[in-house]
Image (cartoon, rainbow, N blue to C red):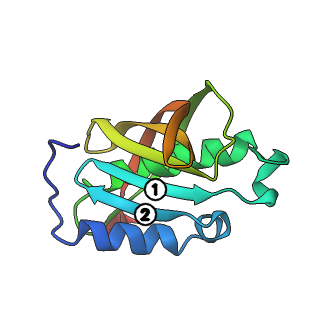
Amino acid sequence: MSHYAASNPDYAQQLVSMVSAMPMARWLGLRFGDVRPGAVELEIDYRDELSFAPGKMQATAIFAAADFAAVAAAGTLLPVGWINASIDCSIKIVAPGDGEKLLARGRVITPGKLITVCAADVFSVRDGKETLCATALASARNIDMGRH
């Protein structure tokens, strides 16, 4: 899944704690699965509040899953005392998000000191079957909190 090494030994716990503390992540019901250096999996369950029609996830929820997964994957490679933030994300929705949940797999494309290019694929999951519904390319700004 990943060929990167984390410089922060507590990267997974710190990443999950930081993202889970975000009000938007809590409202979405975002849950992390696998977290490795340079790669993460996360899930968002279907809820009517996230739909545009019964049983159909709205594009904003799909975008959020992609953005959180991509930028979180980038966050796994940050040194202690650094955070990151989305600065760009482009998504292509290729199928409806009409499953019981969204599963997003984020990954680092090119790590950098200040900017990391990352990506995510989002799957609609129904009865355990994954169907690709979107793919995204993103950039994350890496921020040294000791300098801010």
Secondary structure beneath label 2: strand
Task: Quickly name the residue at label 2.
Answer: 32
Point out residue 128 in the picture as x, y percentages from the top left corner.
Answer: 49, 48
**Amino acid identity at mark 2:** Phe
Point out residue 13 in the picture as x, y percentages from the top left corner.
Answer: 31, 73
Q: Which is more toward the observer, 55 or 72?
A: 55
Alpha carbons under labels 2 and 1: distance apart = 4 Å
Left or right: where 78 falls relative to 16:
left
- The residue sitting at the right extreme is 53
Q: Image quadrant for the N terminus?
A: top left
Q: Residue drawn at (54%, 35%), measured in percent from left and top? A: 89
Point out residue 148 in the picture as x, y percentages from the top left corner.
Answer: 41, 66
Disc 2 + disc 1, Cβ < 8 Å: yes
Relative to 119, residue 47 above or below:
below
**Amino acid identity at mark 1:** Leu
Q: Which is more toward the observer, 142 or 49?
A: 49
Task: Quickly name the residue at label 1.
Answer: 42
Badge 2: few (under 14), some or many (20 or more) residues near its Cα, within 10 Å? some
Quarter assignment of residue 93: top right
Q: Residue drawn at (26%, 47%), measured in percent from left and top? A: 38
Secondary structure beneath label 1: strand
Q: Which is more toward the observer, 87 or 148?
A: 87
Q: Residue drawn at (28%, 67%), measured in percent from left and top? A: 12
Point out residue 22 in the picture as x, y percentages from the top left corner.
Answer: 57, 70
Quarter assignment of residue 92: top right
Left or right: where 82 falls relative to 17:
left
